[in-house]
Image (cartoon, helix red, strand yellow):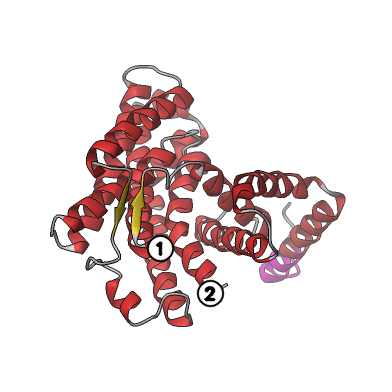
Amino acid sequence: MLTALDLGLIYGLMALGVYLTFRVLDFPDLTVDGSFTTGGAVAASLIIAGQPPLAATLLGAVAGGVAGLITGVLHTKGKINPLLAGILTQIALYSINLRIMSKANLPLLRTDTLLSGMRDAHLFGSWASVVIFGLLAAVFLLLLDWFLNTDLGLALQATGDNARMIRANGMSTDFTIILGLVMSNALVGLCGALVAQYQGYADISMGIGLIVAGLASVIIGQVLVPSRRFVVATLAVVLGSVVYRLVIQLALSVGLNPNDMKLISAILVIVFLLLPRLSFFRAMRARAKDRRLAAAAAADGPDKPLEA
């Protein structure tokens, strides 16, 4: 279970990237399956070639960002449907990733990586590694929260809320869409680079179906911790990633076939999509809203009217 916590926190970076496109930018980006593998492939290839692991990891993130840039340009400049633009980039990346790796699998167990010290000290799957990866996730979570509250971040949010209004005010939605896709896939590529070093290999199929895991993390987090505040929402996304990995680990531990994990992921997403529609959850949210209104009224004083 501690290993699942490790992976949940690492994959939290990928979940933050998916949250940025699907929830903030309102862009259904399917590049993720390809850019995740690209990040792992670039990092593994450079590390095996003798490059510093930190630089290789960062270049993996840059490579993921370039994949997002391609999708953004295809959509904004080529006027290609966002779903199709992501699929085209994802398909192209499969061949590109094979070119980068030269073969389908690159082992890293006998190579010094960014996480070799932790592996040699047998820290993987311990509370020490959970704390380390938790701090890593917290750093990127806070950076994303800070960015979304800058002028550029607010413009990106506004593009997702009402792109027509932004264009009417003379702002370029093409730029904000491309920026959001670059940032999102850079986080995904960074996650792929770290996962490759954590598991000790980069594989051409390591990103297949990852978009389902990213969406599951976002949906689970928002169901468990519903909030419109970005600080809480992004924290909920990382929590959703951890819960998702724990559920998958639990499914494996009770003897379910590993080949059924994609099916389990899909069922998990469906369950958490349907949960908010149940009367129990609607009543629970209504009570929570009443408590917030009561607390706000108490803070304003007895003479001030209650605002809905």
Query: Residue 285: x percent and y percent?
Result: 77, 56
Q: Which residue is mark 1?
A: 142
Q: Please provide the residue range marked out in magenta.
A: 294-303
Q: Which residue is mark 2?
A: 2
Q: Amino acid at mark 2?
A: Leu
The residue under the point 73% across, 48% down is 271
**Left or right: 154, with 67 as reference point:** right
Query: Residue 278: x percent and y percent?
Result: 83, 48
Q: Is residue 172 visible?
A: no
Is 118 above or below relative to 153?
Answer: below
Q: CA distance from mark 2 to mark 1?
A: 24 Å
Secondary structure mostly seen in magenta is helix
User: Which residue occupies the extreme left position in the image?
Assistant: 50
Observer-nearest of 200 and 63: 200
Pointer 2 local density, CA inside 10 Å: few below 14, some 14–19, many at least 20: some
Observer-nearest of 74 and 194: 194
Q: Quadrant of the N terminus?
A: bottom right
Query: Is residue 121 part of the magenta span, yes or no?
Result: no
Q: Nearer the viewer, mark 2 or mark 1?
A: 2
